[in-house]
Image (cartoon, helix red, strand yellow):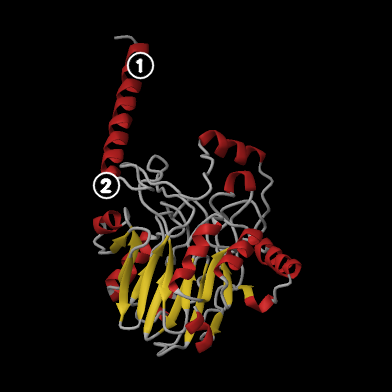
Amino acid sequence: MTTLAVIVCALAGIYAALWLAQRAFVTSVARDWWRGPVTDHFDGARFRNLGPPPQFHGRRDMLRWKMTSKAAVWPKSVPVTPVVPAERIEGEALFVTVIGHITMLVQTQGLNILTDPVWSDRASPFQWAGPKRVRAPGVAFDDLPRIDVVLLSHNHYDHLDMATLKRLWARDRPRIVTPIGNAALLERHGITASEGDWGDSFELGATARVHIERVQHWSSRWGFDSYRALWCGFTLELPGGSVYFSGDCGLDASAFAAVRRHGPVRLAMLGIGAYEPRWFMQYHHMNPADALVAFAELAPARAIGMHWGVFKLTDEAIDTPPTALAAALAAAGIAPHRFTAETAGAVIEIDALPVAALVAG
């Protein structure tokens, strides 16, 4: 056999091995995909949005973005002063501690609730590559009180952080609530979750209930598995007024308006970052102007802007989202204390809604 033939045979063998490995990996991942009846947002294989139809962006658009991008440079790190939260907050009092990015510790009614918990250094399947944290968590993991509930909105790596979920599960065994299509992935890692469709709800105790809300977004962990698991926001229905968490979402005014069916909103936690360039991100992440539209539809007493300033996911500068939010509030004549962009380590007490507002709602 000639040298050329040997090389050709070797390359063919390598190609065949890689192809078989890829097929085995895809088959393994496919075991977690949701299988259920067809609905208005599930075609039997993939989920879809019911709001503005998003433009699908494939590899060509991703390449166009990266080749033409004029991304701002972020600092390598930003100082954070961590805090130690209370062990419990009883009754109608409501405290929110900002961990950072999308992670919030909500304490009320004797419950400790975490949204999309992420303590890892990277939002990536690999801890040696991918978006790296520039702000440390506002609460050190070991300083967390016992967590009762985790609200898990979807499977993107900056939201579903398996390393953090494993630590929480081993330590606290929290109740994990997530939209359909995500529990199988968690189960494969030894974690049990309660999953539901848009419109479903779960009791969290005698005085709290969580509703799974429709939002405009998508899902994927590996690229080839887009739309195989559902995504959502959450409403916590509570005696002093509800708390809304948007997760990741683009602007769908009708979805936000529907949240008010659970009563008046005491607090809305809304994404305001990771939105440039708009031609690529507009259907999936709100910018501050979009977030003000959501604010108007939800009509909350107070709002907190999140999903900014921790992981560099898109092109805008690290502090552009809060600056743009302040400008949008001023232009709309909305008092700046009603909607604030809080950073890691902030602790916010949210007043209960007046009885008259609760009765009217």
Percent x, y of residue 62: 55, 39
Q: What is the CA distance from the residue labelled 1 to the residue labelled 2?
A: 48 Å
The residue beneath circle 1 is 8
Question: Of residues 280 and 17, which is closer to you in this image?
Answer: 280
Percent x, y of residue 300: 56, 74
The residue shown at (66%, 43%) is: 69
The residue beneath circle 2 is 37
Query: Is 83 above or below relative to 131?
Result: below
Identify the residue at the far top of this view: 2
Percent x, y of residue 256: 52, 63
- Residue 204 found in image quarter: bottom left
The residue shown at (63%, 73%) is: 339
Q: Residues within 10 Å of mark 2 (few under 14, many from 20)?
A: few
Say left or right for 137 vs 5.
right
Q: Secondary structure at mark 1?
A: helix
Q: Residue type at mark 1?
A: Val
Q: Is residue 88 visible?
A: yes
- Residue 328 found in image quarter: bottom right
Query: Is 361 above or below relative to 78?
Result: below
In the rendered structure, which disc, 1 or 2, sits on the residue that comes first in sequence?
Answer: 1
Q: Residue type at mark 2?
A: Pro
Q: Is residue 138 visible?
A: no
- Residue 251 found in image quarter: bottom right
Q: Quadrant of the N terminus?
A: top left
The residue shown at (41%, 90%) is: 91
